[in-house]
Amino acid sequence: QVQLVESGGGLVQAGGSLRLSCAASGRTFTSYTMAWFRQAPGKEREFVARINWTGGSIYSDSVKGRFTISRDNAKNTVYLQMNSLKPEDTAVYYCAADQRPVVVGRKYDYWGQGTQVTVSS
């Protein structure tokens, strides 16, 4: 069983930055694929970024070049550095984890409770 706890959300002006953190329990964190998703009001949860156990990462087109996902295996933590934030980035951001190296869509085994990010114009 893996537990995920997100933190770092808040209110920021457009153009600003935030860094989200996701602390994971469990001794096998290093082998997990970790991802960030987000869900805006009235919309489906959407993929933001993913990082695998080797450090390889992919991003959605909407955040590419502005967001950076990283992991610190010694701290069992994955981060999402968000720069040049836009009002359309406003959403609840969720951390997800899975033992499989490739996960299709939202089919991750473990999810955090989410952290709110609000970007004002």
Image (spheres, rainbow, N blue to C red):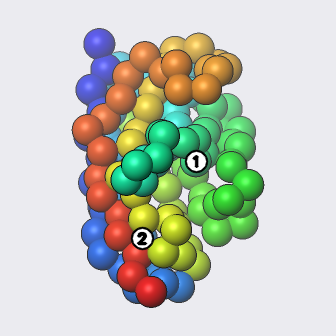
Circle 1 residue: 48
Residue 26 found in image quarter: top left
Disc 1 to disc 2: CB gap under 8 Å: no
Q: In this view, does 86 lie to the left or right of 8?
A: right
Q: Pointer 1: residues within 10 angstroms few (<14), some, or many (20+)? A: many
Chain-order first, disc 1 or disc 2: 2
> Eyeballing the image, is 72 above or below 62?
above
CA neighbours of label 2 inside 10 A, class few (<14), some (14 to 19), many (20+) = some
- In the picture, the disc for residue 18 is 2
In the image, residue 111 sits, relative to residue 21, either above or below, namely above
- Secondary structure, mark 1, is strand
Asked whether residue 61 appears in the rendered view, the answer is yes
Residue 72 visible (yes or no): no
The type of residue carrying mark 1 is: Val
Q: Is residue 40 above or below residue 102?
A: below
Q: Position of residue 96 (x, y in %)?
A: 44, 32
Observer-nearest residue: 71 or 64? 64
Q: Nearer the viewer, residue 14 or 6?
A: 14
Give the mark toward the camera: 1 or 2: 1
In the picture, measured across the screen, residue 41 lies left or right of residue 71, that is: left
Residue located 48% across and 21% down the image: 108
The image quadrant that residue 50 belongs to is top right
x and y percentages locating residue 74 in the rendered image: 41, 39
Residue at (53%, 85%) from the top-left corner?
15
Identify which residue is drawn at 28% across, 69% down: 10
Q: What residue type is labelled 2?
A: Leu
- Residue at 29% from the left image edge and 13% from the top image edge: 1
Left or right of 5: which side holds 48?
right
Residue closest to the far front: 42
**Distance CA(mark 1)–CA(mark 2):** 15 Å
Give the quarter of the image for residue 3: top left
Secondary structure category for the residue under label 2: strand
